[in-house]
Amino acid sequence: MDTLPNFGLANTITGFATLFAGLLPLAFCYLVDRHPPRWMFVYWLIAVTGVFTITLHGFGETNPMIFERWVWAFLDTGSNIVVAWGVVLAVLADFYTKEMQHWARPTATVGMLIGVAWHFYDRMTAGGYLVSFGSWGGFKPGQSWLISFSLAATILFYLKRKSIPRKAVPLLMLVTGIFLAGLLMATARNETIVFPFLSLHALWHVTGAFGFIALWAFNDVRFRAAGPTP
């Protein structure tokens, strides 16, 4: 295995931040106070996608090994889509009626499967950007689907803002701001380094990881305010 280039090394090492962004909330929950199973499931999904972030950049991005690069890329963004799906299901269970969940949960699941399948086909056929920003970068179909799913989860939260304990609302806004900042960084190509040392994709990993920790904090505040864990 050849030595990774600077951007590849940065992307790989910061992938561990994503992994820890799933493992730390799980540790907090097991050591202090557990969140509902639906959110514990989300934290596990974050840890899994962290593993695939590491393998993409460590094994698949510049020195493909074991599998071709597209397989590692599929596992990375594909698992991201599954995380967004898990968040949508958790938010539906937290705030929405059984009647709405009856159709919204299957709809979200079908949407997740379509997104993963589209992403698989796009990576297997080496497709290009769906949303292009020229030489700077852009978003491929799987990434675009991920953004749409994440926006859906965000909208579901904000539609029920009045049901969220007052102390938790600023944390929801913090989570939103962190991921919006990360979205801007994610527009750049993986190898983009802004002088003198800002590896934007690696910085996105770190930003996203803090976003997931902030999501845990938001959940923790609102669940404590609501009383015993449902």
Image (spheres, rainbow, N blue to C red):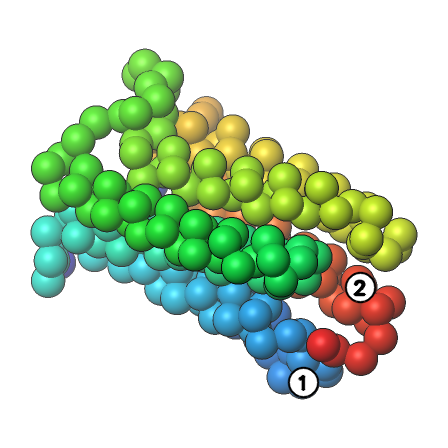
Judging depth in this view, the residue of 129 and 104 nearest the camera is 104
Report whether residue 124 is seen.
yes
Measured Cα–Cα span from mark 1 to mark 2: 16 Å
Residue type marked 1: Leu
Judge depth for marks 1 and 2 and give the one in front: 2
Of residue 75 and residue 120, the one placed in the foreground of this image is 120
Q: Secondary structure at mark 2?
A: helix
Residue 21 in the image, given as x and y percentages of width and height:
54, 62
Q: Which label was assigned to residue 31?
A: 1
- Quadrant hosting residue 156: top right
Instruction: Tell me where residue 26 appears, x and y as whole percent.
Output: 58, 75
Q: Are marks 1 and 2 in contact (CB under 8 Å)?
A: no
Height in image: 152 above or below 53?
above
Q: Which residue is mark 2?
A: 221
Q: Is residue 39 left or right of residue 128?
A: right
- Neighbor class of circle 1 (other Cα within 10 Å; few <14, some 14-19, many 20+) is few
Q: Residues within 10 Å of mark 2 (few under 14, many from 20)?
A: some
